[in-house]
Image (cartoon, grey):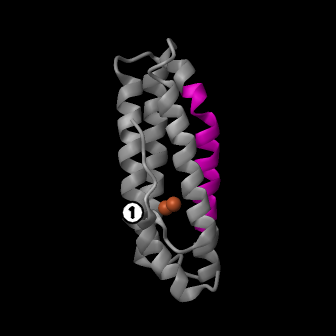
Amino acid sequence: MNITWKAEYCTGIELIDTQHQHLVFLLNNYFADQPRLDISSATSWQMLQEFNGYADDHFATEERFAHQAGIEQSGVWILHKGSHDYYINRLREFRQELETESPRAVEKLMAFLSYWWVAHITGEDQELANLLTSYLVT
Ligand SMILES: [Fe+2]
Ligand SMILES: [Fe+2]
């Protein structure tokens, strides 16, 4: 599993794009290590911690932009924040599955991560960036 960065993933907001590219880089490193290593699901989860920490910082960056732009009450942002919250909850569920060594948990987690991030970056983050650029000079 590997995510190939494409030009159309860019939002035009430099900090967001830099962070997205680094998220994809960290995720690809995690994906690349999984099949080569004979590890437990719990260890696999530990290997994802750098990515998880960076993802938290990234969500905080988008929240800060939304606050600076004064769009926190807009429908676009409320749905966007809901999408981040959904992701955070799903990761919490995956963590439990991995800790109990549930079968194929790592495989399911990798599929979810790859699907969610590409869909979010190419969909909701583009919509957010359009709204932010109309309110912010970044
Ligand atoms: Fe994002
Ligand atoms: Fe986002």
Q: Quadrant of residue 58?
A: bottom right
Image quadrant in which the N terminus is located: top left
Magenta residues? 45-63
Q: Which residue is mark 1?
A: 122
- Which residue does the image show at 64% across and 43% down from the upper left? 53
Q: Quadrant of residue 35?
A: top left
Residue 61 included in the magenta stretch of the image: yes
Residue 74, how many percent across, how many down? 45, 79
Q: Is residue 127 above or below residue 82?
A: below
Q: Is residue 69 above or below residue 5?
A: below
Frontmost residue, 10 versus 62? 10
- Which residue does the image show at 56% across and 19% down from the upper left? 43
Which amino acid type corresponds to the residue marked 1 in the rendered image? Thr
Residue closest to the far top: 38
Residue 34, how many percent across, how many down? 48, 24
Residue 129 included in the magenta stretch of the image: no
Is residue 112 found left or right of 92 in the rendered image?
Answer: left
Frontmost residue, 8 versus 82? 8
Image quadrant in which the C terminus is located: bottom right
Magenta stretch secondary structure, dominant: helix
Total marks shown come to: 1
- Which residue does the image show at 53% across and 23% down from the upper left? 44
- Which residue does the image show at 37% across and 65% down from the upper left? 123
